Image (spheres, helix red, strand yellow):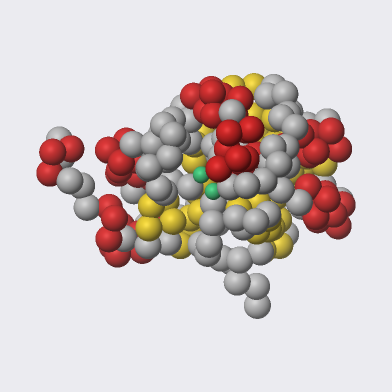
């Protein structure tokens, strides 16, 4: 019996989560088993391994998205772009961070990867469409200025059992929300007040059963985080 919270292939959705690179960033491949179209999110490293998985499922990449421009989430963008020809998308408010890959690489003592050309800048309210899926772009600043989360709303299981999608909503939260924790805000452009506002106003309003796939570590749900995440108490001054 497949665990819906881990790598998951069914008639309606292919969702592979691959921890890549030194910092084990969770790269997600979300594919439509019928049209074989896929979205790749946060290919931070190990492009060859991601490409192998795409080939295993016979998927064609329609777009490559980074939830934010930290090096562990963007390191494989150029190789993925070159190998697939798919457009690379990220939020405009992280472009400054993306232009400083050399500085970021120096922080963690690695060589800077060559940058991809960013084909489209994402904004709050954008919708990504591939196969029979769509994901809403939620701008969730705080970990970085241009951090985004991607929300795949649940598909109503109506007339036929072969209808596309995910019976439960899925949220790719980048480094904004983790199981029992939140993203760090002490790096360039970070803000504790903003990340808390992002989580409260844009993520905790989603249905309890929404499965959250953070940028690192295991999955959780919106309900579990609302009930038990100790970092989500608002400091008094920002309660409004
Ligand atoms: Zn990060
Ligand atoms: Zn990260």
Query: What's the residue at 55%, 43% (across, down)?
Result: 107
Q: Position of residue 134 (x, y in %)?
A: 60, 38
Q: Position of residue 31 (x, y in %)?
A: 72, 49
Is 98 placed above or below 215 here? above
Q: Quadrant of the N terminus?
A: bottom right
Query: What's the residue at 82%, 41% (across, down)?
Result: 60
Q: Quadrant of the C terminus?
A: top left
Can residue 196 be seen in the rendering of this structure? yes
The answer to which of 199 and 131 lies nearer the viewer is: 199
Is 103 placed above or below 232 here? above
Query: What's the residue at 71%, 48% (across, down)?
Result: 45
Can residue 153 be seen in the rendering of this structure? no
Horizontally, residue 231 falls left or right of residue 153, namely: left
The answer to which of 6 and 141 lies nearer the viewer is: 141
The answer to which of 169 and 138 lies nearer the viewer is: 138
Q: Position of residue 44 (x, y in %)?
A: 67, 46
Horizontally, residue 196 falls left or right of residue 159, namely: left
Horizontally, residue 125 falls left or right of residue 195, namely: right
Q: How many marks?
A: 0
Res 190 → quadrant: top left
Horizontally, residue 215 falls left or right of residue 78, namely: left
Residue most extreme to the left: 236
Res 37 → quadrant: top right
């Amino acid at each position: 019996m497949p665990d819906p919270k881990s790598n998951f292939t069914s008639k309606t959705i292919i969702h592979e989560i691959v921890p890549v690179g030194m910092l084990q960033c969770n790269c997600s491949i979300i594919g439509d088993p019928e049209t074989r179209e896929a979205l790749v999110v946060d290919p931070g490293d190990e492009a060859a391994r991601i490409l192998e998985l795409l080939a295993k499922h016979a998927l064609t990449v329609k777009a490559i998205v980074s939830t934010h421009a930290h090096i562990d989430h963007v390191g494989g963008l150029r190789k993925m772009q070159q190998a697939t020809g798919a457009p690379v998308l990220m939020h405009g408010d992280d472009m400054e961070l993306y232009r400083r890959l050399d500085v970021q690489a120096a922080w963690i003592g690695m060589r800077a990867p060559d940058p991809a050309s960013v084909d489209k800048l994402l904004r709050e309210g954008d919708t990504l469409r591939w196969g029979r899926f769509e994901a809403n772009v939620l701008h969730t600043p705080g970990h970085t200025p241009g951090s985004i989360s991607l929300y795949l709303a649940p598909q109503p299981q109506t007339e036929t059992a072969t209808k596309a999608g995910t019976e439960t909503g899925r949220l790719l939260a980048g480094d904004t929300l983790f199981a029992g924790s939140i993203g760090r805000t002490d790096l360039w452009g970070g803000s504790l007040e903003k990340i808390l506002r992002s989580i409260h106003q844009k993520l905790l309003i989603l249905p309890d059963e929404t499965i959250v796939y953070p940028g690192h570590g295991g999955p959780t749900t919106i309900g579990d985080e609302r009930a038990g995440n100790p970092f989500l108490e608002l400091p008094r001054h920002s309660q409004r």
